[in-house]
Amino acid sequence: MSNNIFGLDGRTALVTGAGNGIGRATAIELAAAGAVVGCADIDDESCRSCADEITAKGGTAFSYTLDVRSQAGFESVASNLFLRTGRIDVLANVAGAITARGPLLSMRDDEFDHGLTLNLKSLVYGCRAVGNAMISGGGGSIVNISSGTVDGRAPDLGAYSIPKAGVLQLTRTLAMELGGDRVRVNTVSPGYISTSMTAAHYRNPDGTVNQEQQNTIDGEHSAEIPLGRPGRASEVAAAVTFLASDAASYITGQILRVNGGLAMPL
């Protein structure tokens, strides 16, 4: 019998932003690898839908309504998931969004603070909420989602790109602080991925997709990507699942870029 080092049988994972996009794909992929998954999202309906999809495929999942900007909310969800399964082995900090656009010098404090809380502080809250459970369980894997904006120019996106850059240092700091407790901490940095976030650029007023506009925007981005196409949420989810598994047992404090070659820092 072969030992599947990519499998997650017997483990419990908590995924934020599990209602849509990369978060949903990650929850489904982790479940497919054998993990029991806590699906957390501020959108209760989409979160339940994700958990139901996992269950329909033979997996085990629980749905949690969670505003990741709340430390207390995070702790409540983590506590409930721990009571149900007796462990938390994986945290996928996926939730995040572009909350404000515009020049940084003229951006209001509340706009910048919203982006900072959603895209950086919330990840700190998640790590705090599950850290002790991982330590008491003998280890675990935290995977933080950053953004391709940390490797390039991002004018008018300061409320998003600056916190996402902070995610890299959060990862390094926790990798050092938790390594002795066998908790690994890494970052996945997606490039141009086809999700509901990118779809906001080519939606019609009625919510439908403007296919011509999508083709134009995708084509412009694809021209700069060595692999010649946008990425898929499932491809980011596969990277997260790899980092969660024993196949990545000697990897911590690293950034894994899932970007089709768009950025290749040395």
Image: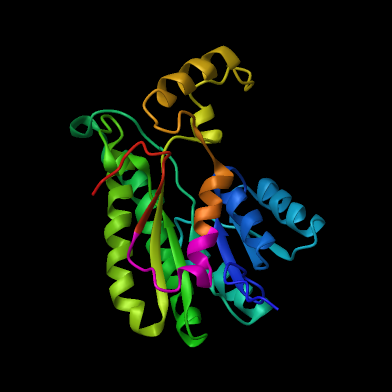
Q: Which residues are magenta?
A: 241-254
Q: In the depicted view, which residue is nearer to us: 124 or 184?
A: 184
In the rendering, at what x and y percent does residue 41 appear? 58, 52
Is residue 75 among what the camera can see?
no
In the rendering, at what x and y percent does residue 9 appear? 66, 73
In the rendering, at what x and y percent does residue 215 appear? 53, 17
Q: Residue furthest top?
A: 212
Q: Quadrant of the N terminus?
A: bottom right
- Please name the residue shown 42% across and 68% down the image: 127
Q: Residue furthest front?
A: 1
Q: In the depicted view, which residue is nearer to us: 78 or 92?
A: 92
Compared to 104, does 1 lie above or below? below
Is residue 167 among what the camera can see?
yes
Compared to 145, does 38 lie above or below? below
In the rendering, at what x and y percent does residue 198 appear? 49, 31
Compared to 188, does 185 lie above or below? below
Compared to 136, does 156 lie above or below? above
225 to the left or right of 239: left
Say how many tags the image has: 0
- Please name the residue shown 53% across and 28% down the image: 199
Tell me the colour scheme of the image.
Answer: rainbow
Q: In the depicted view, which residue is nearer to us: 125 or 174?
A: 174
- Please name the residue shown 44% across and 76% down the image: 131
Residue 13, quarter of the rendered image? bottom right
Residue 253, quarter of the rendered image? bottom left
Q: Residue furthest left?
A: 105
Would residue 244 be counted in the magenta stretch?
yes
Would residue 43 be counted in the magenta stretch?
no
